[in-house]
Amino acid sequence: MHFEELVQMAVPIGQRLKARAETIAIAESSAGGLLSAALLAVPGASAYFLGGGVVYTLPARRMIARIADEEMRGMRSASEPYAQILAQRSRENLGAVWGLAETGASGPAGNRYGDAAGHSCIAISGPVNKVMTLETGQTDRLQNMMCFTASALALLSEALG
């Protein structure tokens, strides 16, 4: 997969968001900014893209996503519950109609929580709430990042109808 393919996936998403006057906020981790980049590569993205962040570390979770340590008790990152709260908080923090979050382990090794490379949890918060877990079975970091992004865009497209 190449970045241009991700942008091609993002074009109809951007068109639907613009036509409906809806906005989106992004929080991504192991996709490393590719999700935001794909959505922002669509001309006219300023009509729907309110902002995003790469929430890759504990300080980023606290400062960018504004998720307190107490909210994380009994929850690990790279999980569906964390992806859900990350999507919700992104939407709420920026006042967007939609929040989209991704968190996982891009590789080449797994993460410290025991997830293998290629593990990602993706969530949508908004008029429709969705969450999914993806296991690519691959250790190639860049390919996993691309796959995580493509899967997040596909889930968003499905949620938008």
Image (cartoon, rainbow, N blue to C red):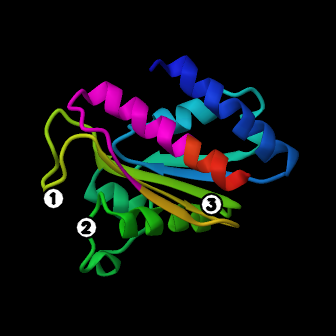
What distance separates the C-alpha of mark 1 from that of mark 2? 8 Å
Residue 88's disc is none
Q: Position of residue 149 (x, y in %)?
A: 47, 37
Q: Position of residue 117 (x, y in %)?
A: 21, 41
In the rendered image, which residue does mark 3 sit on? 94
Magenta stretch, residue numbers: 133-153
Which sits in the foreground, 51 or 99? 99
Q: Earlier in the sequence, mark 1 or mark 3?
A: 3
The amino acid marked with disc number 3 is Leu
Q: Secondary structure at mark 1?
A: loop
The residue that appears at 56% across and 21% down in the rendered structure is 5
Q: Position of residue 34 (x, y in %)?
A: 47, 33
152 lies left or right of 62: right
Q: Earlier in the sequence, mark 3 or mark 2?
A: 2
- Marks 1, 3: nearer the viewer: 1
User: Badge 2: how crowded within 10 Å, few (<14), some, or many (20+)?
Assistant: few
What distance separates the C-alpha of mark 1 from that of mark 3? 29 Å
In the rendered image, which residue does mark 1 sit on? 113
Q: Secondary structure at mark 2?
A: loop
In the rendered image, which residue does mark 2 sit on? 76
